[in-house]
Image: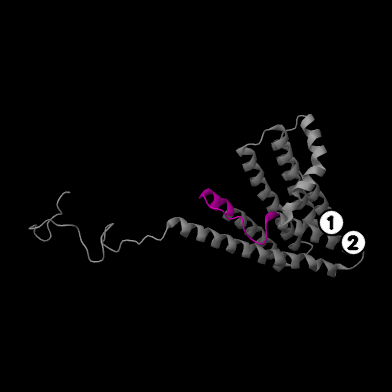
Amino acid sequence: MLERFRAFWTSVWAPVGNLLIRLGVSPNTVTFVGTLGVVLGAVIFFPRGDLLAGVVVITVFVFSDMIDGYMARKTGTVSPFGAFLDSTLDRIGDAAIFGGLAMYYVGPGDNHWFAALAIYCLSMGSVTSYARARAESLGMQAKVGIAERADRLVSILVITGLADLLNIAGVGRGVLWAIPVTLAALAVASTVTVVQRVLAVRVQALSLAGPGPRPGPGQGPGQGPGQGPRQEPGQPSGAPPAAP
């Protein structure tokens, strides 16, 4: 759903990408620095209860995911390794965000159930991505589901930042309940997405396998039920079949 806004934000950050190109910075360097910023923002600020500060830092570095792709296309350096590195580091950043929230709930958030919910979201996010990657490695497609990566990421960052902002403004800590509610919604959505992808791959796999009948026990290809190896006339029962 949120992928439709990628072109808009890419155009917004294009001047930054052009500047980095002129400075000789490579797209892979931007990818690495962006992931490092996301990880540090999540594991430093979230466990201390500084949710809004963490969201601000993470959001700044998340946009590097658009800048590096723009730079690679602009400089003609798009490569399979760059795509692999980008996807791999994206998963590390996602894990840090939900892991940071889990650390918050075992610390100042003081709720182990919500910590477990954050860890479940972390795990299912990885499974969602793996299901698609594994399907594509087998020559099939699994880009279906109600919760793409961008949807999950934007949802939890927006709600976390907004909830802490309202809490700081004096609305009260009760508003922080919006975060576990969002985690629960993402947990359900991620689970449904995994099921959808499994079912989509199953349909494609069955279609590729075809409807041909399978031989029964002791039955070779082309033999009907109860048929054994071909025997020549006059050949004793139990003797080896004649050579063709």
Q: Decide which of 163, 19 is in the foreground and name it.
A: 19
Q: Residue at x 69, y 65 (%)?
A: 117
Q: Quadrant of the N terminus?
A: bottom right
Q: Residue at x 82, y 37 (%)?
A: 15
- The percent position of residue 64, horizontal first and vertical second, equals 76, 43
In the depicted structure, whether residue 31 falls above or below residue 102: above
Residue type pointed to by label 2: Ile
What type of secondary structure mainly makes up the magenta span?
A: loop
In what element is the residue under mark 2? helix
Residue type pointed to by label 1: Leu
Mark 1 burial class by Cα count in 10 Å: few <14, some 14-19, many 20+: many
Q: Is residue 125 visible?
A: yes
What span is colored magenta in the figure?
Answer: 132-149
The residue furthest right is 170
The residue furthest bottom is 174
In the depicted structure, whether residue 134 falls above or below residue 80: below
Q: Which residue is mark 2?
A: 168
Q: Which residue is mark 1?
A: 52
Q: Is residue 49 visible?
A: no
Q: Residue at x 8, y 59 (%)?
A: 236
- The percent position of residue 219, horizontal first and vertical second, equals 26, 61
Q: Is residue 45 magenta?
A: no
Tags 1 and 2 touching, CB below 8 Å: yes
Mark 2 burial class by Cα count in 10 Å: few <14, some 14-19, many 20+: few
Q: Decide which of 15, 50 is in the foreground and name it.
A: 15
How far apart in space, not on screen, are marks 1 and 2 (Cα)? 9 Å
- The percent position of residue 46, horizontal first and vertical second, equals 78, 56
Q: Residue at x 13, y 60 (%)?
A: 238
